[in-house]
Image: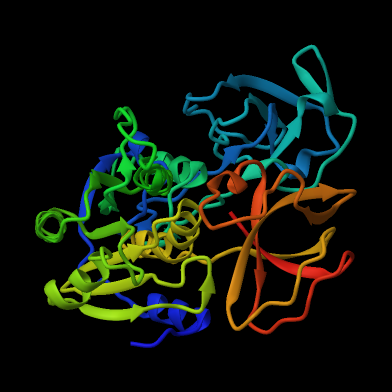
Amino acid sequence: MSKISFENSLEIINNISFDNLQETTVSLRDSLNRVLSVDIVADENLPIKPTSAMDGYAIKYEDINKNIKVISDNPAGNETRLKITKGLSIKTFTGSLMPKGSDTLVPIENITIKDGFIKIEKTVSKGYAVRDIGETYKKGELLIKKGVKIGFAQIGVMASLNITEVKVYKKPLIAVVSTGDEILDIGEKQRSLSQIRGSNHITMEAIAKLHQADVLQLGIIKDDKKAIQDMYKTALKKADMVVSTGGVSVGDYDFVKDIIKFELDANVLFHGVTIKPGQHIVVAKKGDKIVVGLPGFAYSSTVTFLLYVLPLIYKLQGLTKEFETIKVKSNIDMPASSNKSIFTAVNIKNVDGYFTIDMIDKKVGTSAMVTNLLGNSALLYQKPHSQKIKKGDIVEVFKL
């Protein structure tokens, strides 16, 4: 299977569908950042009856230029049985139901009062400061569509509907694992200078959790074909997606790519993309499960996880992940690209209202340098065969 372009690989990812997303019920207070699996429809009007929007005096508008007798007051939460007739008013507070017969509220600061009568010093229009029935929403109105990520506004609206529990899509379970004889887990004692500290599986766990996925952490597996096969069998029974790093290149001990392609009986969607970093990525589908093999270098695995795994995590929650790209001014020179789509970590800054990029403190070297993603970073995107970038050019970056 030959390498495909970055655009083609994204198209394949976008066309992956999950038809049977599972639902669960959570309390409203625990629903922040979850994804609604049902439409939210108003079951009543808000407000139910005309309601005061300010502190003031409820009157008939026809009395606006007269001295009006005050017959009572009407605190919030009180449902007065008194009725406004010609020449009468009731002091009414914010959130109170408007007294029957009234049609306008005059703010307290607009009146003077003497001997139980109010005089309106500054007139208002008819219906002023009165919230009509259904002003916020009407019974039967679709307020929030399924598939929306729940934020504070959605929680506020559902609380106003007295919704205590809400149906959401289950969080996807993502299994993550690093492979390699040379890899040490965090906390594991180094026995040889040839061993390196693995961070890929920890980084992937952090990104997945940041985007509302649950994680099955499988740690590090040595370059043993049977052990890797057993890992996949176990993980695929539990997780919605299995993501590994290492073992996808062309080395003698790169078993992962062959296991995914030949041993799992999976449908390989693509193996190899003309991108830098991460050209040896493998993506496959086995039934309704996804298997992704990422490169072993830390920067490569992190970038490809963001580009390919993150959209799938969103799909498994009923969402679409669209990368935010923006045009920025370059403060760096970059050579022309080859036949690959190139993603370079840069610093992004807002200077005098305009976004600019630079590479201060970024190091030039291999795809192992995950430290280049520290700080307020973005990914400079160079399309294949694009011209060299000069200082002052407008370029495109992927926001992280």
Which residue is rendered at x = 43% and y = 40% of the image?
160
Q: Is residue 183 above or below residue 300?
A: above
| Nearest to the observer: residue 32 or residue 210 | 210
Q: Residue 61's spot in the image, x, y percent? A: 74, 43
**Direction bottom: furthest residue:** 2
Which residue is rendered at x = 25% and y = 59% of the image?
242
Q: Is residue 326 above or below residue 2?
A: above
Q: Could you tell whether 318 is left or right of 307 in the image?
A: left
Identify the image's colour scheme: rainbow, by chain, secondary structure or one colour. Answer: rainbow
Which residue is rendered at x = 90% and y = 30% of the image?
121
Q: Residue 31's spot in the image, x, y percent? A: 36, 42
Which residue is rendered at x = 71% and y = 81% of the image?
386
Question: Can residue 393 be seen in the rendering of this structure?
Answer: yes
Question: Can residue 19 be seen in the rendering of this structure?
Answer: no
Answer with the quarter of the image where residue 231 lies: bottom left
Q: Quadrant of the C terminus?
A: bottom right
Answer with the quarter of the image where residue 172 lies: bottom left
Q: Residue 164's spot in the image, x, y percent? A: 30, 38
* Callout count: 0
Q: Residue 236's spot in the image, x, y percent? A: 14, 60
| Nearest to the observer: residue 248 or residue 33 | 248
**Direction front: furthest residue:** 193
Q: Could you tell whether 50 is left or right of 142 in the image?
A: right
Q: Is residue 116 above or below residue 353?
A: above
Q: Quadrant of the N terminus?
A: bottom left
